[in-house]
Amino acid sequence: MKRLLVAIFVLAVVAGCNTTATENHEHAPDGSHPGEEGLQALSYTLYSDKTELFVEFKPLVVGQTSTFAAHLTKLGDTFLPYTEGIVTVSLLLGTKGLKQTAIAPSSPGIFRLALQPSAVGKGKLIFDITASGITDQIVIPDVEVYANEAAAIASQALTDGANDISFLKEQAWKIEFTNMPVTKDTIYEVLKVTGEIQSAPGDDVTIASRSNGIVKFLTNNNVIGASVRSGQPMFGVSGGEIAFENVEAAKEAARAELSTAKAEYDRISELIKDKLVTQTEYRQASLRYEQAQIALANLSRNYSGGKNLSSPINGYVKTLLVSEGQYVNSGQPLAIITKNNQIILKADVSLKDAGKIQEIREAQFSLAQSKELFNSKELNGRLLSIGKTTSSNSPFIPVFFQIDRRPELVPGSFADIYLKTKPVYNVLIIPVSALIEEQGAYYAYVQTKGESFQKRELKLGVNDGKQVQVVSGISEGERVVVKGAYQIKLTQASGTMPAHGHEH
């Protein structure tokens, strides 16, 4: 009995181990186990300017049906699967050809196709894609059709994918994922400094009171950020009995002076005709009359019933300096209106970089509240001025750019600034977003096949905040992951190979 129990226990352990192996063991794309002899699937990854095609199929053998799993991705800011469309695969072999069409994907992004060649030779596979608003064609040249399976197996080349990380299309399509080819281009050396956004001189206009009195808001739009039109009334200032010492008394005195000056002017005007008064007396009477008219007009305009103050420009309320019902004096600022057209980017350059200031061409910058990188040239910017000395309040040399205003560029915001100086020509560059930093070293993920990636350690050169020079680690033409690198890193860290969600 005891021996029977031991035997049952051993069988149970073996069965458990076999179950685990069956659930977690790896398959080759054709379904065979690694190391087993058999016809291994081919895979191709090709790009047009609109589409990425990643296709897997068994080598073409005369008389045998080869099935194709064509993974089609729309290229753009984020790579997305083709969720509808018609795909035709054609095999052209000399003057002969055959084709098959899928009128819809079997699952988002994956189109199932099949071909059964009837002749041996070397031809090409053509994939024609038609979807809403998209017509595309991708060609795989030099595709061999074998006489039998043995010939196909004999021609199979061993591939080394030991260092590759598997990241399936189904995973990439669910996240923000993009890759791009590594190219050579010009990048500029930079001075990395800090600075701030400031209002442009002349872009702000202050509305000030023209008299003493009580402020009244003439619109409900008197709030910071509100849009105003040129000539739009904004404030009223009423004097009443408390303004300008005694407004009514001043008006009465002005009326009396005007009446007296007019009577004198009329009398002198009659006498001058007969030359009974001099020209000097006439001019004095005329000047007195004009001054009396102006004085009364000013008092009436500024104090009679209050004075309405309007916006002199089209713009926005930048600052509101008073509250309704507040008493103000003549000349006191009430609000600041900004045209909201242009602003100033001020960069503070360290004295150690003073020798490079004259090489500055343009600026790239980001704000603390935003990850977006702005470029002065793209904002119609120009280098406004370069300081010649430091100020008593700052040990830095100021550099000013005038740029177009954007809603997120708020004066008073602090910025990280990359000042572009000397160009470095014909070097490998990749976007900064492709970089992964680990303990001071930098890496990027390179796509080796449609669903295979390698982690590469990079030696970097110039970094302008948007792009970075790669000295070593990547070659020209390889495709580097620009968006989605962190998700691939998590897949690698998990140590598990994701299961395919489609049949190969």
Image (cartoon, rainbow, N blue to C red):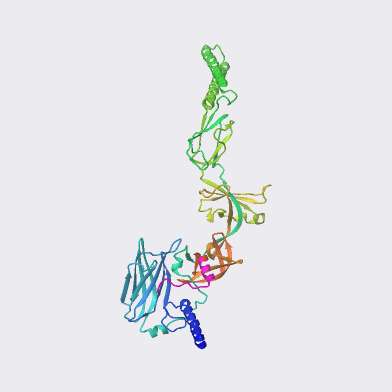
The stretch of residues the image draws in magenta is 487-504
Tell me: residue 203, above or below residue 139: above
Q: In this view of the protein, can residue 1 be seen by the observer?
A: yes
48 vs 391: above or below:
below
Q: Residue 371: which quarter of the image?
A: bottom right
**200 and 155: which one is in front?**
155
Count all numbered tags in the image, as a single digit.
0
Residue 118 x/y as whole percent: 31, 80
Q: Nearer the viewer, residue 424 or 380?
A: 380
Which residue occupies the extreme front position in the image?
1
On whether residue 491 falls in the magenta region, the answer is yes
Q: Is residue 183 visible in the rendered structure shown here?
A: no
Q: Which residue shows up at 36% across the image and 60% down it?
A: 133
Where is residue 8? Give x, y as percent.
Answer: 49, 84
Q: Quadrant of residue 425?
A: bottom right
Q: Is residue 163 left or right of residue 95?
A: right
Q: Where, quadrant-wise, is the C terminus in this rendering?
A: bottom left
Q: Nearer the viewer, residue 32 or 308?
A: 32
Asked whether 414 falls inside the magenta stretch, the response is no
The image position of residue 291, as x and y in percent, is: 55, 22
Expressed as whole percent of the image width and height from the top left, the position of residue 129 reads: 36, 67
